[in-house]
Image (spheres, grey):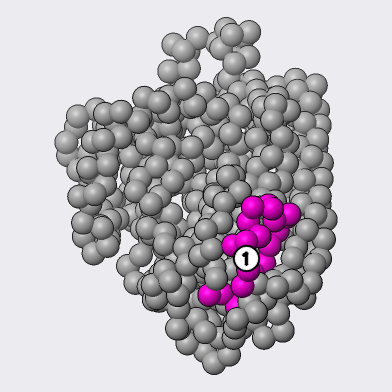
Amino acid sequence: MKQFIRENLAFSIAYLVFTAAAVALMTLSRILPFIDLPNHLAAATICRYIGEPGNLFSQYFETDLWLNSNIFHYLFLMFPLFPTVEFANHLFYAIYAVLLPLSVLLLIRRLGGNVWLTLPVFLLINNYSVMWGFSGYALAIPLLIFLFHLTIESQTNPSWLVRIGIAALLVFLFFVHAQVALFGIALFVVCGLYHHRGRLGPLGKEFSAIVPVAILFIAWWMLREGGSDTLDYFRRYYGHAYWATLGLRWKLVVFDNIFLFRTPLAYWVAGFFTLVMFSPLLVGLVVKRVRLSELKTHRYFPLAFILPVLALILFFALPQAIPRQPIVYERLSVFVMLGVIILGSLIFRRGVAAYTKVALTLIVVVYFILWADYYMQFNQENENLTEQIFPADASQNTMAGLVYDYEFRGHPICVHLPYYYTVWTRGVTPAAFVDYRFGVVSRKVDFDVLPLYLTWEWRAMRYDGRYSNMDYLLVRGKIPQHIYPRLREFKPVDTWGNWSLLENRLR
């Protein structure tokens, strides 16, 4: 008994310390280093303040939150009790940092797995979708694990109360992130088909839980999509382009920590952390020679097996993008890893050696040290990006961004940083989110008034003069020599480190 208490105390201390470290990463950084996050912050700022005196948002933008998916992050940031959008966003990511390991811990406890093997989940705090700034998707990850928990509960201890909980969570997932909601439906259906094995009566009761979210998806699709262009795209994609992406999908093993360093070091470090996540499963099957026939006798192992296998199948089956919506299949890598961690905890449910616990603890410590250095260096490099570099009358002027120095440690982390002009000053700037397929903010004016934002053209060092009607121009990095003739309307105002502000001399 004393040893049991001592071991649980040691795990609890490690778990709480690592949770605090994850929350610290998300709350102590002035600017979070997530690629698309400035998109979401600026869009939420427009939604929160549009129509108010003192800004020009209503002249340039329209907002639409009605029956739209992926809106929870915006609604959270718009909540009037939060003093600023950024304060709310830090709180949002702190909640995510708490819920991700907690969701897996509760599931592993429910399945009878080894809680020490929850620790590798902390290696996914900065997973691929988080680093890309997919805010809604980030929170949807632990919600999917809670859904999986309820799914297993429904099939082992069925009740209408559990089904109502599943139905409500699926509807909530739709508003948090539609892609995860679709994956949740698929997971729920596959688990139901396996568990009931053709018994139509129980299967019908089980699947009644997906009716509300199915109606919601149909209404959303009919109202906003129509779908013909998407279906045509799929026919073309799987006929040709899909096969060219198969060679890239091996990166599954490095996706979730690849941002830490430049390649090739990034591959080695990310691959090592992935190996740690896979180790319990691999050691159990290869070294300990645990037989699958033995695992089948475990009450929950077959159901737990469905999560990583289904995620892996979809990872290799889904397209790389759909029209005006990139990065689709890559987002599923985190669910493959979480599923593998859960399976490993079941294989070693009777315990792991003391040196394994020490090793896991030290690896997670190293992980947080590396990421803390990443966050701190990113903020040091962007210490000059403050409200002070923007014009004094920013809320009444337009400003476009040219980002030639867009990389941090070899990844395009800085490409959307000019949007902080909107977040901090409520000024108007050309931004990618106004042309998103599933966005909540859309353009109210033509491209000649609010130009299309140049997002990835920096790779070719291009600029076609489209910002000539903007009041100001904010540049990150050194302007290429061949670009200067296309900036003849602008004159330098000031420079702060690698940021420069130019004013339109014709305004």
Q: Is residue 14 visible?
A: no
Q: Report the residue at 70% width, 73% height from top.
A: 491
Q: Nearer the viewer, residue 249 or 364?
A: 249
196 in magenta: no
**Residue assigned mark 1:** 487
Magenta span includes 470: yes
Q: Quarter of the image for the C terminus: give it.
A: bottom right
Magenta span: 469-489
Identified by mark 1, the residue type is: Leu
Residue 431 vs residue 184, the one in the foreground: 431
Residue sticking out furthest to the left: 200
**Image height of 497 relative to 407, above or below:** below
Task: Give the answer, above or below, for where 263 lies relative to 499.
Answer: above
Q: Is residue 65 visible?
A: yes
Question: Along the line of sight, which residue is nearer the eye, 216 or 457?
Answer: 457
Measured as percent of width and height from the top left, residue 296 is found at: 43, 18
- Could you tell me which secondary element the residue under label 1 belongs to? helix
Tag 1: Cα neighbours inside 10 Å, few (<14), some, or many (≥20)? Answer: some
Name the residue at 62% across, 65% down: 487
- Residue 29 image offset from top left, x and y in percent: 76, 59
For this rendering, which residue is in front, 129 or 210? Answer: 129
Residue 139 lies, in percent from the top left, at 53, 53
